[in-house]
Amino acid sequence: EAAFGDGLATGRLDADAYPDLVVAVPSWLAGSAVDVIFGSAAGLDPAVDALWEWSGSGFEPSDLGSVADRIATGDVDGDGTDEVAVGLPMRMVETCACDAGGVIVLSAGATRDAPPTLKELTQDSPAIPGTSEVRDTFGAGVAIGETDEWSWKAQSGIVTNYDFHATVLHLLGIDHERLARDGIADPFPIQAA
């Protein structure tokens, strides 16, 4: 059973200036995907969406599992557009023939209709410390951004829950500022991301 919408992320996945919405479409039986709904000047444009699948890329359905809370966006490669990172903590890894886990990074193609490019990362990938071992669950948590030296606190690109919700409301065409309560001080002023 697909749990469409259990996970959401926003980012700028194409060259325009409008935020896009990424919706997780996990399924134990049919593989997994993310549905990218592209933004426009008028908000989200459901007529212009793309289903980015990876189940046909050497992944088995049992590798995928639920990605609902394992999805993030950010500019990983420095090209000015965001990529989508999806954690797959039950991914079978060839080097150890075990369920060590992995992360896939999806980048938009040259056009919105083009399939995304896919890059897989495991603990056996260059520049990633450690080695894949049974039940490592590598990819159980995914975030993109700069952190402190302990990887504990975000240092850049910080988005509060308030900002995230304001962005989703904006993408849905709802003026989030009209939802504010008059006369109540808000320690976190809401801004669309």
Image (spheres, rainbow, N blue to C red):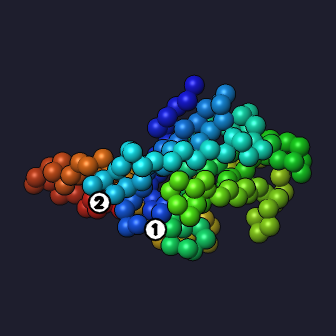
Report whether 28 appears left or right of 81. right
Badge 2, how many Cα within 10 Å: few under 14, some, many 20+?
A: few
Q: Is residue 180 visible?
A: no
Q: Nearer the viewer, residue 25 or 186?
A: 25
Q: How many marks?
A: 2
Residue 18 falls in which quadrant of the image?
A: bottom left
| Residue 37 pos. (x, y %) | 43, 49
Read off the residue under disc 1. 15
Q: Residues within 10 Å of mark 1 (few under 14, many from 20)?
A: some
Q: Nearer the viewer, residue 54 or 27?
A: 54
Label 1 sits on a secondary structure element that is loop
Dot 2: element: loop
Q: Is residue 86 above or below residue 107?
A: above
Which of the two labelled residues, at mark 1 and mark 2, occupies the earlier sequence position? Answer: 1
Judged left or right of residue 54, residue 52 is left
Q: Residue 173: x percent and y percent?
A: 26, 49
| Residue drawn at x 52%, y 31% as measured from the top left | 3
Residue located beneath label 2 in the image: 41
Q: Quadrant of residue 1?
A: top right
Question: Residue 188 shows which numbered tag?
Answer: none
Query: Would residue 30 be visible to someone looking at this image?
Result: yes
User: In the figure, 7 relative to 3: above or below?
Assistant: below
Task: Check the image and report above or below for 153 versus 23.
Answer: below
Q: Position of residue 144 (x, y in %)?
A: 56, 62
Looking at the rendered image, the quarter that the C terminus falls into is bottom left
Q: Three-letter amino acid code at disc 2?
A: Ala
Q: Which residue ends up furthest to the top in the rendered image? A: 1
Report the side of 59 relative to 116 (left or right): right
- Residue type at tag 1: Ala
Residue at point 48% right, 71% down? Answer: 156
Residue 145 drawn above or below residue 40: below
